[in-house]
Image: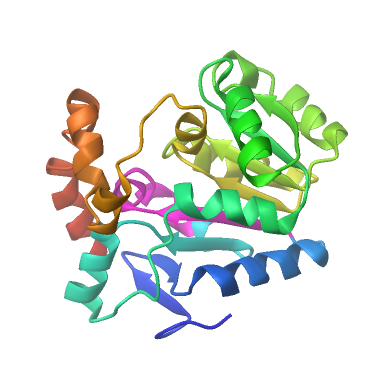
């Protein structure tokens, strides 16, 4: 896999890939074809804070962490003097990835009905084959039943959208039992695809200000994430 700068950047104890969309998709496709299980996670500032206790597990073979958001870009420049090859925002990256892999997917997360609506959007906009869904509430009460449903569906890819650190904990706990070879932590992706959460306009995203747009939408839930948690994030980056 190629990209500007070193292949890996160690930031705050997390080994982050510095790459672009096309080589990353090619890398994931090769591993999928060879039957090698891969966990793909998008590391933003909230990921660093919420998943700090999981750093040792997230350094294990098969886990791929990529940078997501301006916070990571700033920290990499200030602390490591490194510029990431590309901002790999999961909401933008994952639908084209699933389309190009052309592999059946299983979606997990959101309130009841969200994953089904997200599946319909993926089918309509990117011709992605979704072969099963589970909501992120009562749908996960019986882990054994969930694993059987995933394996019986014939899915090659599992998208887990439970937010940090729930999705990372779920993936790490269950990856040994999962048949699918690509397991992805997707944050709020299903909510965006289902139209439950409105994305920032393209010009706001181009200015790397989507975080400010989301804060204006959900100030009570996100205020701490974009204030006090930023200080924790910067401290972790220096460890």
Residue 55 part of the magenta-drawn span: yes
Quadrant containing the N terminus in the rendered view: bottom right
Residue 236, above or below 78: above
* Total numbered labels: 0
Confirm whether the magenta stretch covers residue 117.
no
Instruction: Say which quadrant the C terminus sits in.
Output: bottom left
Along the viewing direction, whichever of 31 and 173 lies nearer the viewer:
31
Residue at 25% in and 36% down? 214
Q: Is residue 238 visible?
A: no
The answer to whether residue 222 is above or below residue 204 is: above
* Front residue of this view, candidates 115 and 143: 115
Horizontal side of 165 relative to 82 (left or right) equals right
Residue drawn 37% across and 73% down?
A: 10
Question: At 59% across and 21% down in the image, what residue appears?
Answer: 135
Q: Quadrant of residue 164?
A: top left
Instruction: Point out the stretch of residues depicted in magenta.
Output: 37-57
The colour mode here is rainbow
Task: Answer with left or right where residue 122 lies relative to residue 44.
Answer: right
**For residue 103, above or below residue 196:** below
Residue 62, image x, y percentages: 64, 63
Does residue 152 appear anywhere in the picture?
yes
- Picture coordinates of residue 125, whole percent (x, y): 61, 41
| Residue 160 image offset from top left, x and y in percent | 58, 38
- Against 231, residue 166 (above or below) is above
Closest to the observer, 231 or 185: 185
Q: Is residue 91 left or right of residue 10?
A: right
Q: Position of residue 37 (x, y in %)?
A: 72, 58
Residue drawn at point x = 51 percent, y = 24 percent: 110
């Amino acid at each position: 896999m190629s990209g500007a700068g070193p292949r890996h950047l160690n930031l705050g104890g997390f080994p982050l890939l510095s790459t672009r969309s096309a080589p990353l998709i090619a890398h994931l496709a090769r591993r999928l074809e060879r039957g090698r299980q891969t966990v793909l996670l998008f590391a933003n500032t909230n990921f660093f804070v919420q998943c700090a206790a999981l750093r040792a597990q997230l350094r294990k073979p098969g886990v791929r962490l990529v940078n997501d958001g301006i916070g990571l870009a700033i920290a990499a420049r200030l602390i490591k003097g490194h510029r990431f090859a590309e901002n790999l925002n999961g909401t933008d990256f994952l639908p084209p990835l699933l389309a190009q892999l052309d592999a059946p997917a299983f979606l997990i997360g959101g309130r009841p009905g969200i994953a089904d609506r997200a599946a319909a959007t993926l089918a309509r906009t990117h011709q992605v084959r979704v072969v099963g869904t589970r909501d992120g509430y009562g749908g996960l009460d019986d882990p054994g039943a969930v694993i059987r449903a995933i394996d019986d569906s014939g899915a090659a890819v599992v998208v887990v959208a439970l937010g940090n650190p729930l999705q990372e904990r779920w993936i790490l706990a269950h990856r040994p039992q999962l048949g699918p070879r690509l397991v992805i932590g997707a944050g709020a992706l299903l909510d965006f695809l289902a139209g439950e959460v409105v994305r920032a306009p393209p010009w706001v995203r181009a200015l790397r200000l989507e975080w400010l747009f989301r804060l204006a939408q959900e100030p009570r839930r996100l205020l701490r994430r974009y204030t006090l948690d930023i200080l924790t994030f910067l401290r972790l980056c220096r460890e």
